[in-house]
Image (cartoon, rainbow, N blue to C red):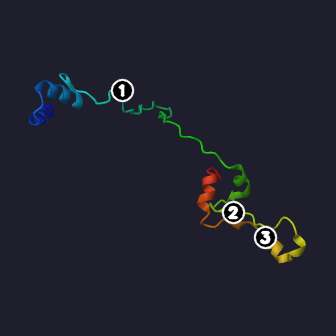
Amino acid sequence: MAALLTSCMNKLSLSGSFTQKKATASVGFKASGLVAPFPRVQQLVPKATQPKEGCKPAVVEVEAKYKLKTRKAAAKRFKRTGSGKIMHRHGSNSHLQYKKDSRRQKRLEIDAELDSTKVWHVERMCPYL
């Protein structure tokens, strides 16, 4: 690889001492062998140990991710059912009840399923709902 670089540099008619320095510096070769271009960067490999008899297997530590914050106002307005649906309360049920028919009032008391177009927004506001 170094020979290929030096031959290419020689074809460009550059001085021999300059090409030799440039080729060795850019590729990262030394007399002892190949040197990584970024010696401080190391690839981290988790250590996996064999568990002893009667012991739990070793836990590999992984870098923790950030916790997501829940919007408390949204968390109070929505709840998730056992099957995974998100339910919400109907509006127009807090005052002026005398104008509304009793059937309408009963219908507004029952929680409704959230529309599929808004599920993504609520899940983003309440990641642990």
Q: Is residue 119 left or right of residue 46?
A: right
Q: Which residue is mark 2?
A: 87
Q: Which residue is mark 3?
A: 108
Q: Where does the image place residue 18, in percent across and percent down from the top left?
A: 16, 26
Q: Which residue is mark 1?
A: 40
SS under mark 2: strand
**Label 2 amino acid?**
Met
Question: Which residue is more in the foreground, 76 or 73?
Answer: 73
SS under mark 1: loop
Q: Is residue 88 left or right of residue 57?
A: right
Q: Where does the image place residue 101, in percent across and percent down from the top left?
A: 85, 77
**Label 3 amino acid?**
Leu
* Crowding near the residue tagged with mark 2, few <14, some 14–19, many ≥20 C-alpha atoms within 10 Å: some
The answer to which of marks 2 and 1 sits earlier in the sequence is: 1
Residue 47 quadrant = top left
Above or below, 122 relative to 55 = below
Q: Where does the image place residue 19, in percent across and percent down from the top left?
A: 15, 29
Q: Is residue 7 visible from the viewing direction of this image?
A: yes
Q: Is residue 28 visible from the viewing direction of this image?
A: no
Picture residue at 18% right of the left edge, 30% below the top: 23
* Crowding near the residue tagged with mark 1, few <14, some 14–19, many ≥20 C-alpha atoms within 10 Å: few
